Image: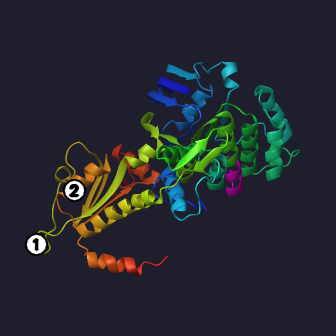
């Protein structure tokens, strides 16, 4: 579930951060659900526990998760619209770059229609 | 916390470490990178008190290490050369180290030994290179020191053993705030394991920072400009394109395509180049391997020069 790409250029903590948001948006992690512990997740992914802790701290700072001392981290009351907005902002950046590079809106629309999951 | 202040180390008249400062915080996994002969092993041997420095001061949690038995009990060094005492069996070797390290855990040792099925009663000399490595690494972890120094220790281990060691390190970091210092040429491994890295070259520290900020601060920019007229590509110099205030590590141009490696804030870079109306502009973060190569290139350690000689 928590697959990350160790070959990716994106920092590992950022990948963990984004993965949690993705799982919440998809409804796989729901409100008040417990996240894997720092220990379990770092062992599962074979990464540094400080890296996982850093991602969790960042998620907590942005009120996406909350932690109870001694019990672990949990999904906060989720504002899915806010999270979708977060992803759309990244989308806007790509679109802007594509438009600046000379692509037309029509081409981009067709592209979206053609994307398969 | 380990602190090296103005450390100079010489062998005969050869300066191996040249007045370096380095701080390694408690609980981090610290990666030491560097060219061959840069001084990585020397740093580890100074921290573990095997060598004494010619100048400067090294402290581990405020105490000196050289000839200091109490500090040495808290530091375990795994040498990059396969171990001595080859007439010992694994158990004899374990007992030898157990005498020196008071927190040694038989339980932990046996748990790891039986997982990898390492023979107890055979002489170490009959072990393969990788098995010798396994032996010393499981002893090192079982010693439960506050500081664990691994000098290219992962290099001889098989993938399963690597995962076992990494998981033991995760537990040790969370349970007893272990600090690990790893020197390796396997940058993929450093990227996964470490949160802080230092790059060494020629006895000096090039940088020492947390890994994410290292990776976030250096970018590969690929940019293409329209031709001025047919068959006449745009010709920008470094200054015209990147301007002052940004550090350019590498600048290469072929026809209308520019490859630039630059340090600094992405937004500033983007803004400057965008003003010249490129057709294509890609800014991507570098991998650790690329960072290594380009930082070294600036210092004159450059694989391209092989072809120009």
Camera sees residue B12? no
Residues under numbered marks 1 and 2 in contact, where contact means CB atoms less than 8 Å apart: no
Q: Residue at x 42, y 53 (%)?
A: B290
- Can you give x and y, in whole percent of width and height, for residue B191 in the image? 53, 50
Indicate the colouring scheme.
rainbow
Asked if residue B282 lies left or right of residue B238, the reply is right
- Residue at the right extreme, as displayed: B121
Given this view, does label 1 or label 2 mark the residue nearer the observer? 2
Asked if residue B109 lies left or right of residue B309, the reply is right
Q: Nearer the viewer, residue B295 or A6?
A: A6
Is tag 1's residue or tag 2's residue first in the polypeptide sequence? 1
Tell me the CA gap for discs 1 and 2. Answer: 20 Å
Q: Nearer the viewer, residue A75 or B235?
A: A75
Is B96 one of the magenta-colored residues?
A: no
Q: What residue is pinned by disc 2? A: B273
Above or below — where is B206 with respect to B225?
above
- Residue stretch in magenta: B156-165
Badge 1: few (under 14), some or many (20 or more) residues near its Cα, within 10 Å? few
Q: What residue is pinned by disc 1? A: B229
- Quadrant of the image occupied by residue B137: top right
- Quadrant of the image occupied by residue B233: bottom left
Could you tell me which quadrant the C terminus of chain B lies in? Answer: bottom left
Is B157 one of the magenta-colored residues?
A: yes
Q: Residue at x 62, y 50 (%)?
A: A42
- Can you give x and y, in whole percent of width and height, for residue B299 in the image? 36, 43
Could you tell me which quadrant the N terminus of chain B lies in? Answer: top right
Above or below — where is A109 with respect to B162?
below
Circle 2 sits in a helix, a strand or a loop, which is it? helix
- Quadrant of the image occupied by residue B171: top right
- Residue at the left extreme, as displayed: B229
């Amino acid at each position: 579930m928590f697959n990350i790409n160790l070959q990716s250029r994106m920092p590992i903590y950022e990948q963990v951060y984004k993965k949690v948001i993705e799982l919440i948006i998809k409804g796989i992690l729901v409100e008040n659900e417990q996240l894997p512990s720092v220990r379990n997740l770092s062992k599962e992914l074979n990464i540094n526990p400080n890296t996982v802790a850093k991602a969790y701290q960042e998620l907590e700072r942005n009120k996406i998760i909350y932690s109870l001392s001694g019990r672990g981290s949990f999904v906060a009351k989720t504002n899915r619209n806010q999270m979708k907005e977060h992803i759309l902002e990244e989308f806007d950046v790509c679109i802007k770059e594509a438009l600046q590079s000379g692509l037309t809106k029509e081409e981009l629309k067709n592209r979206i229609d053609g994307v398969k999951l | 916390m380990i602190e090296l202040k103005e450390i100079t180390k010489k062998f005969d008249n050869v300066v191996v470490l040249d007045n370096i400062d380095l701080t390694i915080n408690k609980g981090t996994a610290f990666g030491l990178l560097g060219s061959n002969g840069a001084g990585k092993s020397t740093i580890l041997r100074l921290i573990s008190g095997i060598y004494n420095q010619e100048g400067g001061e090294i402290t581990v949690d405020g105490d000196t290490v050289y000839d200091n038995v109490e500090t040495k009990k808290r530091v375990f060094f795994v040498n990059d050369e396969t171990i001595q005492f080859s007439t010992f069996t694994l158990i004899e070797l374990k007992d030898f180290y157990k005498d020196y390290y008071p927190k040694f855990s038989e339980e932990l040792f046996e748990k790891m030994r039986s997982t990898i099925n390492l023979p107890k009663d055979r002489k170490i000399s009959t072990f393969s290179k990788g098995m010798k490595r396994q032996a010393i690494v499981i002893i090192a972890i079982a010693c439960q020191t506050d500081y664990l120094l691994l000098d290219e220790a992962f290099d001889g281990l098989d993938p399963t053993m690597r995962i076992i060691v990494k998981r033991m390190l995760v537990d040790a970091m969370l349970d007893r705030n272990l600090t690990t210092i790893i020197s390796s040429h396997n940058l993929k491994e450093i990227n996964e394991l470490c949160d802080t890295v230092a790059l060494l070259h020629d006895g000096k520290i090039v940088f020492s920072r947390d890994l994410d900020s290292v990776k976030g601060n250096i970018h590969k920019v690929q940019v293409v400009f329209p031709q001025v007229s047919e068959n006449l590509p745009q010709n920008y110099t470094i200054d015209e394109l990147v301007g002052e205030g940004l550090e350019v590590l590498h600048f290469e141009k072929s026809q209308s395509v520019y490859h630039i490696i630059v340090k600094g804030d992405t937004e500033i870079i983007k803004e400057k180049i965008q003003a010249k109306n490129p057709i294509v502009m890609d800014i991507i973060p570098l991998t650790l391997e690329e960072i290594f190569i380009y930082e070294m290139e600036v210092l004159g350690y450059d694989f391209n020069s092989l072809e120009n000689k």
